[in-house]
Amino acid sequence: MDGKYYKNFIYNVDLELKNNGWSRADFALQLNCNSSTVSKWLTGKREPSFEYIVRITKVLGCTFEDLIS
């Protein structure tokens, strides 16, 4: 993912977590992954795979375009 889009992705996912009152651990449980994995995504240390991007959009009820805009 391009740097600008990834920054938007991080910001928008973090915002959705706050709006829903979810911790990163709560979100990880819904995605069936480790909370450390979610933390790495949201600190920019690692990008989620396509499979996880699809899961993220389903859990958050949005599109990928919503997350990167």
Image (cartoon, grey):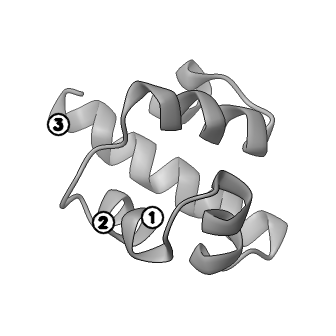
> In the picture, which quadrant includes the N terminus?
top left
Q: Residues within 10 Å of mark 3 (few under 14, many from 20)?
A: few
Q: Which mark is residue 38?
A: 1
x, y (%) of residue 62?
Answer: 73, 30
Of pointers 1 and 3, the one earlier in the residue sequence: 3
Marks 2,1: beta carbons within 8 A: yes
Q: Which kind of residue does numbered mark 2 sit on?
A: Lys
Task: Examine the rendered structure and indicate whether residue 48 appears above or below residue 51.
Answer: below
Task: Quickly name the residue at label 3.
Answer: 3
Q: Is residue 15 above or below residue 13?
A: below
Query: Which one is nearer the viewer's eye here, 10 or 40?
Result: 40
Residue 6: percent from left, percent from top: 30, 39
Residue 40's tag is: 2
In the visual, does 64 lie left or right of 1?
Answer: right
Inspect the image, locate mark 3, and give the three-letter code of the amino acid beneath it: Gly
Q: Nearer the observer, disc 1 or disc 3?
A: 1
| Residue type at tag 1 | Val
